[in-house]
Amino acid sequence: MNIATAQEAKKSEKPDTWELRLYVAGTTPKSLAAFSNLKKLCEEHLAGKYKIEVVDLLKNPQLARGDQILAIPTLVRKLPQPLKKIIGDLSNTERVLVGLDLRPAKG
Amino acid sequence: MTKLENNIKPLENLPKCQTGIRGLDEITDGGLPKGRPTLVCGSAGCGKTLLAMEFLVRGAAQYNEPGVFVSFEESSEELVQNVASLGFDLNDLAAQKKMYLDHIRVERSEIEETGEYDLEGLFIRLNHAIDSIGAKRVVLDTIESLYSGLANEGILRAELRRLFRWLKEKGVTAIITGEKGEKMLTRHGLEEYVSDCVILLDNRVEGQITTRRLRIVKYRGSAHGTNEYPFLIDEYGISVLPITSIGLKHDVSNERISSGIPRLDTMLGGEGYYRGSSILISGTAGTGKTSIAATFADATCSRGEKCLYFAFEESASQIMRNMRSIGVDLEPWMKQGLLDIYAVRPTIYGLEMHLVKMYKLVNEFKPKVVIMDPVTNLISIGSETEVKSMLSRLIDFLKASQITALFTNLSHAGGALEQTEFGISSLMDTWLLLRDIEIGGERNRGLYILKSRGMAHSNQIREFLLTGRGIDLIDVYSGPAGVLTGSARYAQEAQDRASELIRKEEIEHRKRELDRRSKALEAQITALRSDLKDAQEEVDKLLQQDKTEEKVLTEDRAEMMRRRKADV
């Protein structure tokens, strides 16, 4: 089952562009770390087919409601479907890759 | 007492936020702590969400304090639907910018955690919500859902601590709900962070009957009621009813009110019951307890006063039909709104709930007289001590409001008559006893006053008759043949009447005889008188004659002497 969904996700990822949105609250060290971690990871795995939008909730607090944001920073994978959320400073690259379906979960 | 009040005074300075929930503000001495979070905990289905929601709705509607409801469980649409049945129109309040509903959904399956994070997003959302409507009240229902959504408990704990501190800084009065845990008040120990006020809700089932209860576990810096208070959820929301024994401080009235039975009033010192007293009518089945109660209700309404009748055995229409047969028509009073018959089976809910319901009805209807018929039926849903405690609280409450209460008590045949089921007689001021008197193959009703505090009352047994024109009390026959009632009394009385007649005739006869004799004597006296008169006249005449003769005689003698030329 897991393998099947993972394979499907792999199939669909090829033609699609990756639309990622990073929610932050001001320029905190955690936010900055998350952004640089994300940037690095995308360059490595999704070079040329990704788009990162950074939303600062301090400036647009009303946007937190739409994507059900609680934790900061939160990375939301808008595309490809399904929606995925990864919270934290994205320092654990392995888990981010699993969370984005770029690598099947181990075990 | 004064000393205690002095101690409380400085504490009242703690600013309070009125909830607007009936009764809750009384037991919290004015409301929840203003600008601080309050924890409301309890097991599933005990009314946490509703209490929190009513706090917001009342705040928005009555105190002009807009509120934010953050739901972690139900969606906004579900919430709107759920509370619509209680008459709360959340959409309307939201449109007026008095209410802000937010649903925060946390799906663990959607979330992957990598590294450090905080809950700044939640803060921002909350802050945005509060600022957008200028909210003074906030509800977080149930924030513990976050524990199931987020894996890192360490972060969560730290963030919740920060959240509650932040809420205080923000100056909003908040209610945080929490699911009851096994050993702690809440599953994740929220009470650790929210230390100002903790309210515990409970929904217990005893003997297949559930009762909702509320208890204030703590309230820092304020006096508060410490008991468990039963509460109701009805079509108007929550009502908590602080019903405790308020002590024997109530004022008493010297006013007397009629029982509706003139003869009974006479027996009760000539004026009837005291206003605000408690009256117990006990008797075995079919002795006319309900009739006395209904007559009293009728008398109350005739005075233009309101009467609330709790019937635990018969429906309202049945009581009205039955009472019409003894000439007591209660229907017009019902139509005029002076009488309300609240008929319900005792088993419908628990004792406390009954008390709560009665309390509520009394407060709404504001009667002058409350009747409970029969109070004995309550025993089926509680133990003796429970019933007694409930009744004493009810009586205290009624007395404090100067409401006259009449209870009927069904005693079982064979048991001692002068004994009520649960020793409530000591709570009563006036106790009427109805009993069967079996003589000559028939049963008749007898009534007497066992006690009546504060008035000279009759010690006589009266025969109690139910006629088409109402209740009638008549003297029982007590004579040389003993105490007789019913037909035996009639027979005895007829016999008495006959002998009385004979006696009267005899007296009449003798009177006539004496009359005649005295008349004869008088006639004799008259005859004698006239005889006497005759005799006197005779004597007068004789005297006159004598005088005349003597005069003549003297004249003659003088003549003779003149003629003889006597030398006198």
Image (cartoon, helix red, strand yellow):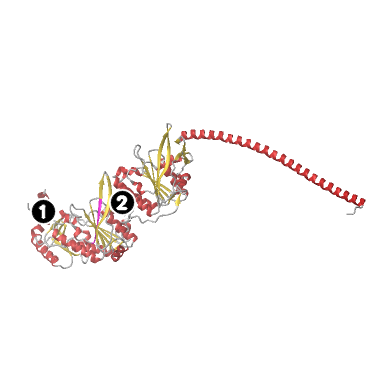
From the viewer's perspective, tell me whether residue B81 is left or right of residue A81: right
Mark 2–mark 1 distance (CA, rounded to whole Å): 54 Å
Residue at 9 percent across and 53 percent down: it is A105
In the image, A45 versus B24, the foreground residue is B24
Res. B337 in view: no
- Magenta stretch encompasses residue B314: no
Three-letter code for the amino acid on which mark 2 is drawn: Ile
Q: Nearer the viewer, residue B371 or A85?
A: B371
Residue for badge 2: B233
Give the residues drawn in magenta, as a range. Answer: B196-202
Which of the pair A102/B181 is nearer the observer? B181
Q: Identify the residue position indicated by label 1 in the image.
A: A10
Residue B470, x across and y down, in percent? 47, 41
Instruction: Point out which mark residue B469 bears.
Output: none
Q: Note whether residue B232 is visible.
A: yes
The answer to whether mark 2 and mark 1 are in CB contact below 8 A is: no
Q: Chain of mark 2?
A: B
Identify the amino acid type marked 1: Lys
Q: Is residue B453 above or below residue B2?
A: above
Residue B566 placed where, x, y %?
90, 52
Quarter of the figure with residue B442? top left
Question: In which quadrant of the rendered view does residue B152 lie?
Answer: bottom left
x then y, percent, for residue B452: 41, 48
- Crowding around mark 2 (Cα neighbors within 10 Å: few <14, some 14 to 19, many 20+) is some
